[in-house]
Amino acid sequence: MSRPKEFYIKIIVILFIILMTVLVFVKFRKDNNPDRITEEQKNAIFRATVKGKILIKRLKRMISKALKYIIETLIYSDFNIEGTELEFGVKGDYEPIILNLENGKKIEITGKIDRVDIAKTAEGNYIRIIDYKSSIKNIDLNEVEAGLQLQLLTYVDAICKKEKTEPAGALYFSLIEPIIKSSEKLTEEQIEEEIKKQFKMNGLILADVNIVKKMDKTLENGNSKIIPAYINKEGNLSDKPNSVNREQFERLQKYTMKLLEQISESILTGNINIKPYYSIKKKSSYC
């Protein structure tokens, strides 16, 4: 049974603060040799250096901005949080993802999902996975085909199978400090709209108008301010590379798992051939 949204909003606030604190700490570790610094000195860095004070101020601004839009994505959505920091592993929330290879060997995949949301409809239950990133990130289906972006689709497939649900999306939420560029003076409302655009989620969504409207209850037509979706005047979703129908989603899920098996077999056989990836803009066969 899902808990109220307010409960998970509090959890997200706590997790987000912890995450951003860790990011700042990691940045300091890169700039300072940890072998020469005691734990007390590491903590003192945050208070004693100008750099630390500036980063803490930036951290506070990022937290206040990002949390506002994280909460908005929950308020204006019929998707409820099913869980956060869900782990695939021996002692995790779910068992490891198992790959049965042709040579009889088994591969276990472990990992964590930042957030899983669920929407319950008369047609069935739909899930979306949201991954928090400290930079702007999107899903490129050409990179998925090349085996470079398999993480979220792997988790989507695994969760759908274990929970017997349908996929609604695999999305990234960027935890950034927004910078607004303009050649003209903007009003506060215009600045707010520009900031909101930068916190809009990116990724892959199911090309289903009803499901899209459950992810953004305010969307009637035009661009969604929450997810990468556009509904035209006729009430149809635009044909964008980031939206796939149910059949295409299923093909992506099967392709992802098959590719993981091929990669695993290649690793186990010691194949370390140099095969660079060349970024060529082309329409993926899955969209």
Image (spheres, rainbow, N blue to C red):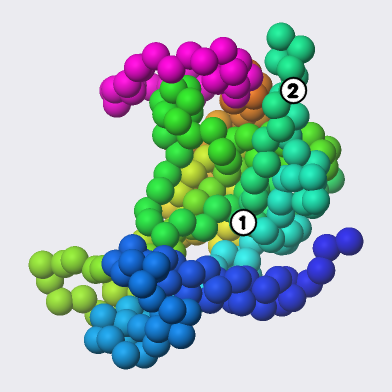
Evaluate whether residue 222 shows in this view: no
Quadrant (top left, top right, bottom left, bottom right) of the N terminus: bottom right
Between the C-alphas of marks 2 and 1, the distance is 26 Å
The residue indicated by pointer 2 is 106
Residue 272: horizontal and vertical position, in percent?
43, 17
Q: Looking at the image, which residue sits at the far right?
A: 1
Q: Which residue is drawn at 54% across and 20% down?
A: 267
User: On the rendered structure, is 17 left or right of 200?
Assistant: right
Q: Residue 114 carries which label?
A: 1
- The amino acid beneath tag 2 is Lys
Measuring from the top left, give residue 39's x and y in whole percent: 47, 79
Q: Quadrant of residue 71?
A: bottom right
Residue 138 tag number: none
Residue span colored magenta: 259-287
> Badge 2, how many Cα within 10 Å: few under 14, some, many 20+?
some
| Nearest to the observer: residue 130 or residue 35 | 35
Amino acid type at mark 1: Asp
